[in-house]
Each structure stands twice: as structure tokens, then as C-alpha cells.
Image (spheres, grey):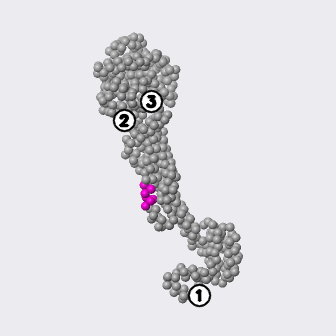
Amino acid sequence: MISFYNITKIYPPHTVAVKDVSFQVQEKEFVSIAGRSGAGKTTLLKLLLAQEQSTRGQIFFDGQDISQIKKKDLPWLRKRLGTVFQDYKLLASKTVYENMVYVMEIISQTKRHILKDVPQVLEIVGLTERANNFPAQLSGGELQRAAIGRALIHRPDIILADEPTGNLDPYHTRDVIQLLLKINQMGTTVILATHNKEIINRLGKRVITLEEGKVIRDEDPGRFIL
Amino acid sequence: MFISLQRILKYGWQDFWRNRSVSASSIFVMVMMLSLITSLLLSQQAFKFLVLRLQEQVDISVYFREDSFEEDILEIKKELALIPEVKEVEYISKEKALENFIQLHQNDSRIMDSLTEVGGNPLLASLNIIAFEAAQYAQISGFLEKSSFAESIDKIDYHQRKPVIDRVFSISSEINTGGILFSFILALVAVSLIFNQVGLSIEHAKKEIEVMRLVGASDWFIRGPFLVQGVLIGFFATVLTLLIFLPLCFFLSAKIEILLPGLDIFGYFVNNFFTIFFIHLAFGIGLGMVSSWIAVRKYLA
Ligand SMILES: Nc1ncnc2c1ncn2[C@@H]1O[C@H](COP(=O)(O)OP(=O)(O)O)[C@@H](O)[C@H]1O
Ligand SMILES: [Mg+2]
């Protein structure tokens, strides 16, 4: 479903964030990308989202070379992905509820579905009480859960989760990981980027380990070894 | 498709409403511009009416010398009637002229006294000529001045009236040019205000727009609401302008009719309401859309 071929990303002038990376992700897989902070995990996800252009190499998603994707095809790609950004990226002028509605509207979901699904997802991420608050009024943990809710509300084919537990207490961390596993069981591909050793070791799923932009390990099941 | 349009409208309205104080100032300038256009339209109507009236009233009077013979004058009348530009020729004899004069001034004892003092009939026989169009008077008087009977003509009362028509024409065209120029300036102001408003809200929302793109919003889903804002400004400006002019015309109409009997501004406004409405709507919405389109192109490149 996703293939990285010899991907190198150099941020100008000469920060090599990702170096000669190749791997594939099958449909319905649960893949963790492990590595220290600065290893290139976020960059890898940005390349997949076509938020950044690779310097060399190719990325295929469903047969489309997204390292060459045209601007007008970006919505096609991004609608199929659900991303939990490391810095949340919620719409500041919209409430938590409106943030979720917006994503549903982008994929032309009907009003009936929106009215049914949004409260459900709010319930799942435990933000029913905060639905009408703006992002600026939420705590770090609440923002993170709102971001998770927005990433999965439209039932994307793939969920990209960039440090989705970075701001959560152990109790919520466990919940979020359970949730990701459950979504994966229901058939959604999950790519989880994290530097959290415990999470990775407890998952017992495939792990791709990055160090200074290079893949140093790709095992299934894998462990956090650095 | 329809669903997205509906949602774009919703977000456009939301942005318009959440920035309502800025929207109001853009609407205000556009109302001024549209008001000017309306005033032009109505004053055009008044001038057209005035010129028509003046053209109907104006004619040429050719006065014949004291020593002219009536047969000669009637001969000239026949010749004049053959000129295609001439609509009507009326012979007014010395006696008829005196009769008219007395009838006109019978209540003015001073004039009547001086008439008695002069004794006899001091008035001249004349031909009264009415042409089909005002522009033809010059031609007709030219014909008279060059004709074989030019010597028996005492004077042609034409130059005394022509300036009035010319003045009305020139005032009307000056007001028109000035008005068009001024509306053009106001249109530019309106465009730049809306351009700025939309540009500002785009600048303000730069981060949001980036996020919208990242979660897969299409260009149209992002641009649409900004265009809708421009359209809304144009729409509200149109409605407001007409709401101002409808009662204004109603109250002014009676006053204007005293000045220019037969001119019904309010009636004109009501009878042509839809034409006026659509002209305004086209202007208002057109300008609103063009200005936000330019802003969207500049700021959302
Ligand atoms: N926009 C950028 N411009 C320049 N350098 C960047 C940029 N983003 C990330 N980097 C650098 O690229 C490297 C990898 O960063 P990142 O992918 O964010 O790592 P991780 O997510 O694993 O912590 C780091 O050295 C970081 O400083
Ligand atoms: Mg990161």
C-alpha cells in the first residue's frame, strides 16, 4: 500500500533529516516508527503527507508516486489519511466540535452522518464536555485527544500518529494506544511515530527504528532497541 | 457538489458575520457608490424629460419686415412646408400677432398704455416653424438666411432659444461625466476596501488555511468562503441602497413634479424596479466578487 524507495530528505541548506530510507507498509498493518527525538520520524510522515518534498527517491501510495504529486491531487491523498500532528494543528477559530465537522464536510459526508458520528467520536476521546470549547481553552492532553478524534472521524484508510501520547498521562496513554489497536483491528492501517520505549515494547508489533535519518532496524515483531 | 456549495456558503456567511464591523465598512462604501449610480440614473431620466419638453416647446419665429406682402409670406410658407425637416409652419399675421399680444398682456396696464402711446400695430408678421428635431433648427435657419427672400426677413428668433437647449445638454453631459468619474473613483475605493478586508482575513487565517490544506480541503473549499464574503458585501449594499432610495424617491417625487410637471421619478423607479435592482446587483456583486477574487489570487497563491 505504501512504499518508500531510497528516500532522502535534506532541509536546506544541508540538514540531512532522512537518509536513503526504504520500506513498505501493507494494508491493515500496524507499524511503529521508533527513534530518538531528531531521528527523522516526523519528517518521514510529512513526506508521506506530501507536506514536504523528498530530495531524492520515490514514495508510492496506491500506485501513485506522491513524491511527484500535483497540487490539485493533494486533497485526494490527504482525505485518505488521518493525521495526528505532533503540534495538533487544530483550527484555532473553530470549536472542537466544528473541527471534527470540518473534516467530515471536506469528504462530503452527509449531515446525517456528521450528526451521528461526531458526538460518538467525542465520546470515544472523552471530550463530550469540551465539544464547544476552542483549542485555546484546552489543556495539552485535551488538545491531543481532540487531534486524535479529528484524525479518525472520517474513517481514513491510514492513520498517521506522530507522538500521539506525548502529552498524555499514563491512564490516557493506555486508552489512546488501545484505541489505535482497535481501529487497526477494524481494518485501518496505522503508522505510529514515537520515542516512547514502553509503548513500543508493549505493542508487540512491527517496529522500524530510525537513527540519524537512517533505518537501522526493521523487525516484526520488534522492540525498542537503541 | 451541491453539498460543498452549501457548506462554502455557510463558511462564507460565518466569516462575514464574525468580521461584521469590517464587513459593514465595505458595505458602507459600496452603498455610496451604488447611490451615486442610482442618482445618475434618475437625473438622466429627469434631463431626458427636460430636453424633450424644451424641444417640443422650441420653434423658430421668422419675423418679416414691415413692408413685406402677405402673399409673399404665404409663398415662403409653402416653400418651407416642402422642406423635409419642417414639421409644421404657421402664419401669424400682424393682426393676429397684436391679438395674441393683447391677450397675453391685457392685465398689465403699463404695457397696454405704452401700446396705445405707440399707436397702430407695432408688431411684425411672422412664420412660426416647428422642426422634427432640435438639431434641425440650425439647418432650417441656414436655409432661410440663404434663400431668395432673405431680404424681407427682419429677424429670426432662433439664436435666443438655442443656447437654452445647448445648456441643458451640456449640463446633463457634464453631470454625467462627473458622475461617472466619481462613481468610478468610489468603485475603486470599494474594490480596494474589500480587497483589503479579504486580504486581511486571509493573512489572519494563514495558519488555519495551511491546516485546512493538510486535512485535505480542496482549493475551492478554502477560497469559496472568501468569494462568498465579497458577494455578500455586494448583495447587502444593493439591498440597502434600494431601501434608501425607495422612500427617498417617494418623498422627493412630489417636489420634483412641481418643478417639472409630468415627471414622475417614483413611478419611474417603481416601473423599472427590477431593471434597477439587477443593474445594482450586477454592479454590487460583480465588484464584490472581483475584489475578493483578486485578493484570493494574491494571498492564496
Ligand atoms: N523545517 C525544517 N528545517 C530544517 N531542519 C529541520 C526541519 N524540520 C526538521 N528539521 C531537522 O531534521 C531533523 C529531523 O527532524 P524530525 O523529523 O522532526 O525528527 P523527529 O520527529 O524524529 O524528532 C532534525 O535534525 C531537525 O532539526
Ligand atoms: Mg517528531
Q: Are marks 2 and 3 in contact (CB under 8 Å)?
A: no
Residue A71: give x, y in percent of width and height. 50, 30
Residue at mark 2 to residue at mark 3: CA–CA distance: 21 Å
* Callout 3 amino acid: Gln
- Label 3 environment density (alpha carbons within 10 Å; few <14, some 14–19, many ≥20): some
Choose mark 2 or mark 3, whichever is in front. Answer: 3
Of residues B257 and B55, the one nearer the viewer is B257
What subunit carries mark 1?
B
Q: Secondary structure at mark 3?
A: loop
Residues shaded magenta: B244-251
The relative height of residue B74 versus residue B215 in the rendered view (above or below) is below
- Residue placed under numbered mark 1 in the picture: B120
Residue at mark 3 to residue at mark 1: CA–CA distance: 101 Å
Residue B84: give x, y in percent of width and height. 68, 67
What residue is rendered at 46% in x and 50% in y? B238
- Residue placed under numbered mark 2 in the picture: A93
- Residue placed under numbered mark 3 in the picture: A109
Choose mark 2 or mark 1, whichever is in front. Answer: 1
Residue A197: give x, y in percent of width and height. 33, 15
What subunit carries mark 2?
A
> In the figure, is residue A215 to the left or right of A70?
left
* Callout 1 amino acid: Gly
What residue is rendered at 63% in x and 68% in y? B131
What residue is rendered at 49% in x and 59% in y? B267
